[in-house]
Image (spheres, rainbow, N blue to C red):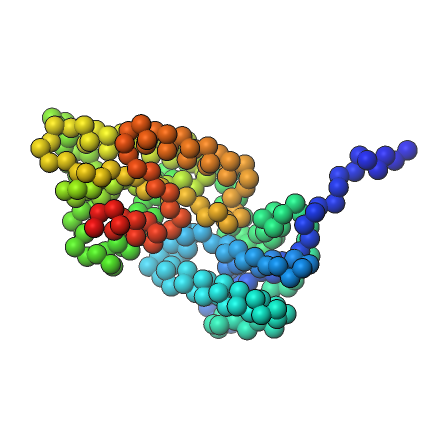
Amino acid sequence: MCDLDMFPEFPSFEANWIPIYFEPILLSGERITIAIVIIDASGGFKIFPTLREEVLDSLYGIKSKNLSNMVNHCKSSIQEHLKNNKPFELWQPPFKGIYQGKTTPAADDNVFKVAQQAIQRCSSLSSLSMAAERDYDDELKQSHKVSQRWQEAVIKNVLTKMPSFEDYFKVKIAIDRSKTKTQFGFLSDRTAINFGFLSGFGHSSSLNTIKARILDLEHLMNSNSLVLPEEYAILIKTPSQDDVSITDNIKDKLSDTIYTIKDIGQKSNVTICTVETSEIAANKIIEIAA
């Protein structure tokens, strides 16, 4: 006999999702998914960019900022269109090479779960990020490489606004009588800042690196140098709250890790700042150091 109570309840959230594609070379037919638009039955909507900052940087290098701006402009254009209660199929892309994909119905517990369904179906670059939770062969090397690219993006953003800060980046000094020099991400006469990177993948190596950089700041703070900085901080890149390529399991791990890091920072008198983009990080450096 079939017991209906054994069947799971139908998901409470129903919506349609639509991918937004970008064709880097016009008429080539090769397209990448840059965003997912989700529209529920009541007309409510949410737009999820699908390419993380570090992915854009890996793909497009110095042109990644231009593509990021294009994605943001498309997002704003879609928001403006949908706020006016216009059918989404009538939306006109603001640039050539931007295309609207087909509408797909979906159901799940919430909008983020639907977005993850969409990404797994149509965004290979974001799906690779999700798969990384299960398959990460060389986490230390990969984590270091991505972290370095992010730091370079932060430095570039700062120097665009404050060229006079150039000599303060990647400063190496010998602390007390140490024979080896310690490098700091940013070091001026009043501010010492290091960088950290938490992507959710390469978790243990990223956490250990951040702990080491907090310890470097603590050593400098407690050294016998006649002139010491007044402010000590570490800027940590974290995924966006709306990043649907990050699973709930990874988000929980990240939340626990950030709590641990903030506790260590408080005990060491080091300010812990979490930031989502290199531009926000650059503004934070200028705010602390200027």
Pick the front one: 138 or 182: 182
| Residue pictured at 19% horizontal, 57% vertical | 163
Where residue 4 sits, quadrant-wise, is: top right
Determine whether, in the image, residue 69 is placed left or right of residue 79. left
Residue 232 location, x and y as percent?
24, 37
Q: Position of residue 263 (x, y in %)?
A: 37, 30
Residue 193 visible in the current orientation: yes
Q: Is residue 77 above or below residue 119?
A: below
Is residue 30 among what the camera can see?
no
**287 or 21, which lies in front?**
287
Name the residue rendered at 25%, 46% in the picture.
288
Does 198 sit left or right of 118 as displayed?
left
Kindly identify the residue that appears in the image at 18 percent across and 28 percent down.
222
Mark count? 0
Residue 261 x, y percent position in the rendering: 37, 32
Q: Nearer the viewer, residue 25 or 260?
A: 260
In the rendered image, residue 193, in percent from the top left (x then y), is placed at: 25, 41
Question: Is 32 located above or below residue 224 in the figure?
Answer: below
Quarter of the image containing the N terminus?
A: top right
For residue 175, which quarter of the picture?
top left
Q: Residue furthest right?
A: 1
Residue at image location 16% in from the left, 33% down from the top? 181
Task: Tell me the quarter of the picture where residue 269 sits.
Answer: top left
